[in-house]
Image (spheres, grey):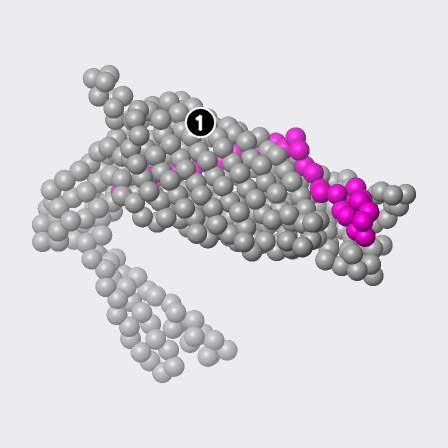
Amino acid sequence: MKKIILLILVITASAQIKAQSVSWTVLKDNPLDHRNFTACIDPLFIDINGNNGYTFGWGARAEYMMGKLFLMNFDFRSGFGTNGYKISDKNTKNYTYLEGGIGIIFSKSQYSKHVPIVLSQSSSTSYGYGYSVTTTTTKYIRGGVPAKHLSIWAFRAGLISMSNSLNYKNLADSLVKFKGNGSDFTFKDSVGNKHFQTGFGALTTVSLYGGIHSRVIRQLQIDVDGWGYRENSRYMDVYLDLLFAPVVSITDFTSAGKTYNVQYDKVSHFGWRMGFANRHPKDQGFNFKFEFGVRPGPKAQDNKAMVNFKNWYCMFTYALYFPMKIKPTFEDQKRTAE
């Protein structure tokens, strides 16, 4: 037990935060001067879900803030590691995700708020008998630096089409029914039949979504006496959506040349999600997007269940993004009005 505790100490870092009074010159503090279009290439995303367990793959995204009125978004993902999917098994489908949407801005405002500025950061490690402790010291400007923020709120709506492999065993062996060619049996009854041993089929959903979108932009660049150039910039999105899927379809199953209609009675057509994304207002680089929620689809058998793990999911992707300025922009419209 002592060795385990010492091992935890090895990877434990203690932070010391020190503030320092300095003077600085503001180089840029204009959240309106940003690039309003972003193209992203996602070399790797991970989607953990109750339908098939997990998927990882690649994708592409784009978002566009058109002037002061519209937000537009596009998202495509395709799996190259979809659990349960086999090219040779026509009963399964690869993870494929396609989304397009538009938002209407209903609120926009500017405000000033102090933000932290890091002057320096250093680490030191001390060693003892069987353990080590790393101490990180960070110096900030005392009290922070005032920065202008642009806050945008929008109503949004769009369409999602998604396909994925589906693990029948995660539903209920006795409740997944195969009907066709004069036969009527459950997945549990198919045990021993080599054509059913994979235990995977496919699910397709088409969903409408609607919700609210928040965006905060700041772009603070300063020259600190004795420390040089420092920056605190952010282009951050947060959204919350409700989902309704008029189409929740479990793919028919083909075995030994015969086609069976797969039926599962407990299906939910509703869901929700919450997501976060960030990037730099002007510079290209790497950004992340994280999303979690409940998708429409097969639901838990126990109607008293507090959490429907059959449709819960979380998705994380890390992307290389390229920001561009495409007119009309938020800043152009402000200047025109002036």
Question: Residue 253 magenta-drawn?
Answer: yes
Residue at the extreme top of the image, as rendered: 337
SS assignment at label 1: strand
Q: Observer-nearest residue: 180 or 102?
A: 180
Percent position (x, y) of residue 250?
A: 71, 42
- Residue drawn at 81 percent across, 52 percent down: 256
Using residue 137 as the reference point, say whether residue 79 is left or right of it: right
Is the residue 170 above or below the residue 28 in the image? below
Residue named by callout 1: 103
Give me the residue at 38% from left, 81% from top. Answer: 130
Type of amino acid at the residue the image marks with label 1: Gly
Region in magenta: 233-262
Query: In which quarter of the view is residue 17 placed?
Result: bottom left
How busy is the neighbourhood of tag 1: few (under 14 within 10 Å), some, or many (20 plus)?
many
Q: Nearer the viewer, residue 176 or 153?
A: 176
**In this picture, is 251 found above or below 36?**
below
- Which residue ends up furthest to the right in the rendered image? 182
Q: How many marks?
A: 1
The vertical placement of 35 against 134, above or below, is above
Instruction: Judge from the rendering whether residue 222 lies leftward or rightward of residue 126; answer left or right.
Output: left
Name of the residue lying farthest toward the bottom: 129
Eyeballing the image, is 4 above or below 54? below
Q: Residue at x 35, y 44 (%)?
A: 321
Q: For this rendering, which residue is in front, 17 or 263?
A: 263
Residue 304 seen in this snapshot: no
Instruction: Judge left or right: residue 38 versus residue 100.
Output: left
Residue at the spot 89% in from the left edge and 46% down from the top edge: 183
Residue 274 x, y percent position in the rendering: 50, 40
Which quadrant holds the C terminus?
top left
Q: Find residue 306 and report its horizontal and vertical position in percent.
A: 65, 45
Q: Main secondary structure of the magenta part?
A: strand
Q: Is residue 117 part of the magenta span, yes or no? A: no
